Image (cartoon, rainbow, N blue to C red):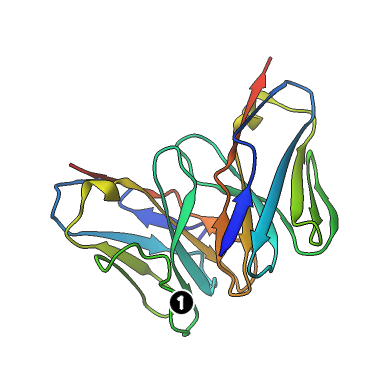
Amino acid sequence: GQNIDQPTEMTATEGAIVQINCTYQTSGFNGLFWYQQHAGEAPTFLSYNVLDGLEEKGRFSSFLSRSKGYSYLLLKELQMKDSASYLCAVRDNDYKLSFGAGTTVTVRA
Amino acid sequence: GAGVSQSPSNKVTEKGKDVELRCDPISGHTALYWYRQRLGQGLEFLIYFQGNSAPDKSGLPSDRFSAERTGESVSTLTIQRTQQEDSAVYLCASSFRAGPQYFGPGTRLLVL
């Protein structure tokens, strides 16, 4: 089975940086994904790590350490529209995703 | 198509009735997934189809739930004898092999 932990809530100021941590304990590992989900909407794909290190994609970056079972999503230059839930998901060897409960990020002016 | 589509977008039904939810994946995507998301909670895996392989049904919560997929196209999720605890958003996603999963808009099911 999969055990995926991430903080429940985070609050940050517009223009600031926020780091959302995710730790996992899994029976198999074939990649870690981050999704953004606005209230009442479906999740949208943000980033994907399968090897250790940092993946940068505009204002969003994601880091993975497989030996530590740890990832983070870094959101830079926060905008009000970044207020959403951020989901960490681990893919097992059979390509099935297991999701964490999500971190609700609130961006304040 | 441009993205994953699902129908209906909303469904209200009475306890005990059967419902059928439809998912049209992105054209060319070999894998299709169904998830359930209860209000304020995370995504719960239900079932996974990959090409012509036998589906992974390990997440289906009871034998009232079943799903089918025709080749690499449309899938239907059927819930028989619906219960109030089945009320949730049912999300479908598709991917090309081991690529990222892309989600549809979901079907909001309310069982009265």
The residue that appears at 46% across and 85% down in the rendered structure is B52
Q: Is residue B108 visible?
A: no
Residue B60 seen in render: yes
Q: Position of residue A85 (x, y in %)?
A: 58, 37
- Residue placed most toward the observer, B55 or A69: A69
Is residue A12 found left or right of B58 in the rendered image?
Answer: right
Q: Position of residue A35 (x, y in %)?
A: 62, 48
Quadrant of the rendering where the C terminus of chain A is positioned: top right
**x, y percentage for residue A6?**
64, 43
Residue at the spot 73% in from the left edge and 20% down from the top edge = A14
Q: Is residue B49 above or below residue A88?
A: below
**Which residue type carries mark 1?**
Glu
Q: Tell me the SS state at disc 1.
A: loop
Residue found 72% across the figure and 42% down from its top: A21
Tell me: B47 left or right of B65.
Answer: right
The quarter of the rendered structure image containing the N terminus of chain A is: bottom right
B52 with respect to A19 (left or right)? left
Using residue A87 as the reference point, say whether residue B13 is left or right of it. Answer: left
The relative height of residue B75 versus residue A99 in the rendered view (above or below) is below
In depth, the one of A26 and B45 nearer the eye is A26
Q: Chain of mark 1?
A: B
Residue designated by label 1: B72
Query: Residue placed at 69% from the left, 58% from the top?
Result: A32
Residue B24 in picture, x, y percent from top left: 41, 63
